[in-house]
Image (cartoon, grey):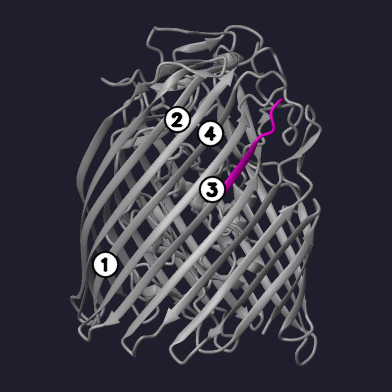
Amino acid sequence: MSGNRRLSSSLPAHWGCAAIAVMALCEVRPARAQDEAHGLQEIIVTAQRRAENLQEVPIAITAVGSEALQSSGISETNTLTQAVPAVQFSRSGASGLFFVRGVGTTNASIGDEGSNAFYVDGVYMPDLSSTVMQFNNIERIEVLKGPQGTLFGRNAFGGLIHVITREPGDHLEASGQVGYANYDTIQGQAYLGGPITDRISADIALTGYDQRDGWGRNVTLDRDIKKMRYWGARSKIVLRASDDVKFVLSGDYYDTDDNTAVGWSVDEDYLVVGGIRSIGSMDTASNDYSLTQLTNWGVSLTGEADLGFATLTSISSLRDSKNRSDFDVDATQVPYMRIAFTSGSRAYQQELRLASSDTEPLSWQIGAFYLRSEVFNRARFTGLALGGLTSGQYIDATLDTDSYAAFGEVTYALTSTTKLTGGVRYTKDQRRLGGGYAALANDVVGVFIPTDDKISYGKFTWRAAIRQELSDDVSVYASYNRGFKAGTYSLQNPQLPPVQPQYINAYEIGVKSELFDRALRLNASVFHYDITNYQVRSAAVGTIGTAALLNAASVKVDGLDVDFEAAPTDGLRIFGGFTWLDSRFHYFGPTDTLAGAPFIYPNPAICDATGTRAPGMTTGPQAGGFKTCFGDASGFQTPTAPDFSASLGASATIPLGEVQQLRVNMMGSYNSGFPFETDGVLKQDEYMLLNGSIEYRPTEKWDLEFWMKNISDTKYFQQKISTGIGATTARAAPRTYGATLRFTY
């Protein structure tokens, strides 16, 4: 079975898609609307924790503004990948998993913070459920590609996604929208902000979404599945205590009922134990109704003081989340395995930064960061595969984390056109595992076996970059970044040992340019990553078939990003991009602590101990379920790392009079496909998506939009997961369409 697995990568055979992507050349979107008289407008980002022109920052960055999000049909984090080819996003239960340039984690268990940091208004979101959000009152989204382990630090191992929301100013603003879509979906948003006094302004943003018909059906329970209800609120109060001191108090609350990612279906290619087949990728025969109920809230206080020689910034925050989930793992009418759990996290963080006011010839920043995270997981695993309908295992585990960091960065102009940047960060992580586990028999908890362990890591990360201006509009840069992600425990399997920290050495060379009087913005970069102790998820080595964590020895990534945006004429904007990757396990075979990489084989199967690359084989027609063998996955494509991904979009504004306008938007994306797990058995095939919309604006304050997403009704997946019982899938959204009415005052 392993003999035909690909050990090296090449550009995809579908040169038509590649050619379209190369013609488009990029994923950079303006954080502000284009200047119709003078081409593209300047993009301001905060990638180095200060406001700078995107073209002057020696980092590969994508900035997507609110108008670009709307015109591209990007309304939530799980569709951001259509606009940013370097980013992939998958769902597992309540959690969202970001991959940037092929780097990420497949583990979505409570307690794991992911390998790519997610920030909102400068606040780090440690819980993976916080990455699943609907966009409202967004000013822009910044995607920083590559390790950001100096200024951001906390788990920005492969990159960082930063959502920046609107801030109320000195004049009244009001906007809103209401829409209706197929699947009997109603959604609405409202924003109101403005001054309260000369020095105080405030706002409130509300969003709601109610999909009342599901994408699929549970035929056993005769109920709709694959649907979601969501509502949330966010507010800011801004106090300008003086001309030099400002405070921003923010708060948010979100409540979600969702089974779009846990309403699992049996994989169409493999049978479940007992020879049970799939009844369709959207439908399920599950005997239990799967549902995730999530509440998420937080408060933060950001203070800025201009001290003359420098600006002092303080960010204090409290984040809290609770997840109640109940789902049928096997997705069949037979009660093989059910998981019901309540988990939650609470995180406190404090950051202090002091940044120089002058930037020429020397700019500098120093700072300190502290995070306290407290996580718990109470779960029941029951079912026939575990000994009976109400028998199995009970887990009540906790994980406390204290993380301390100090950092600094300096940029010096060697000449008027040459700048050198260097930075370093020291991080100390301490984790303590508590609680324990017990056997369940007839729903009675047996003897509780406590788990009490702790790990501690103190590591340096650093950055070095040089930027050279070749002209006023063209510059090149080279950088080296060292990143690290701490080891951790699996709260789904607390009896297993922790995984070791993972490390990355990232090398990058890039060019940034604005050409033809700023009618064309063209950026490109090539990069190479060396990763050691890469943390991966495997259900195969779990003691009860649930998620376990292990370390692959090493991963190597080579890639190319090319970015493009053009305003060839007034009212026309064209944008796109592609990312080519060669992301492979450099070594993932037997080690002193691991038998090798897990491989699954459809039953009936046997494991062969002859030392072949993947020691196992299927011995007859599928009987259902999998057998796990351990072998060598060196050279295999890493999970959720497509060899090629691309996007291409256009937005055209057609005047119908002095005020009236018609705007036509199109957005297409291509993905060459990728494996979901380390052995490459469960895969996402190549796919293309196309979104489109037509907006009619009778006045400057009102517009009516008719839109359609996934126009071709392409079949693709949020997740595929294997257990010994079988393989289950969570398909992504089918074709959706609707109308939205908006106003702005």
Asked whether the beta carbons under mark 2 and mark 3 sit within 8 Å of each other, the answer is: no
Comes first in the chain, label 4 or label 1: 4
Residue of label 2: 492
Using the image, determine if residue 623 lies above or below residue 551: above
Point out the image quarter for the N terminus: top right
Q: How many marks?
A: 4
Indicate the quadrant where residue 284 lies: top right
**Residue type (three-letter) at the residue carrying disc 3:** Phe
Q: Please state which of residues 671 and 185 is positioned toward the viewer in this rendering.
A: 185
**Residue type (three-letter) at the residue carrying disc 1:** Leu
Given this view, does label 2 or label 4 mark the residue nearer the observer?
Answer: 4
Using the image, determine if residue 733 lies above or below residue 241: above
Residue of label 4: 341
For the view shown, which residue lies furthest in the front direction? 444
**Residue type (three-letter) at the residue carrying disc 4:** Phe
Q: In whole angstroms, how far apart are the C-alphas of marks 2 and 3?
A: 22 Å
Comes first in the chain, label 4 or label 3: 3
SS class of the residue under badge 4? strand
Given this view, does label 1 or label 3 mark the residue nearer the observer?
Answer: 1
x%, y% of residue 397?
Answer: 40, 32
Residue drawn at x 33%, y 69% as measured from the top left: 49
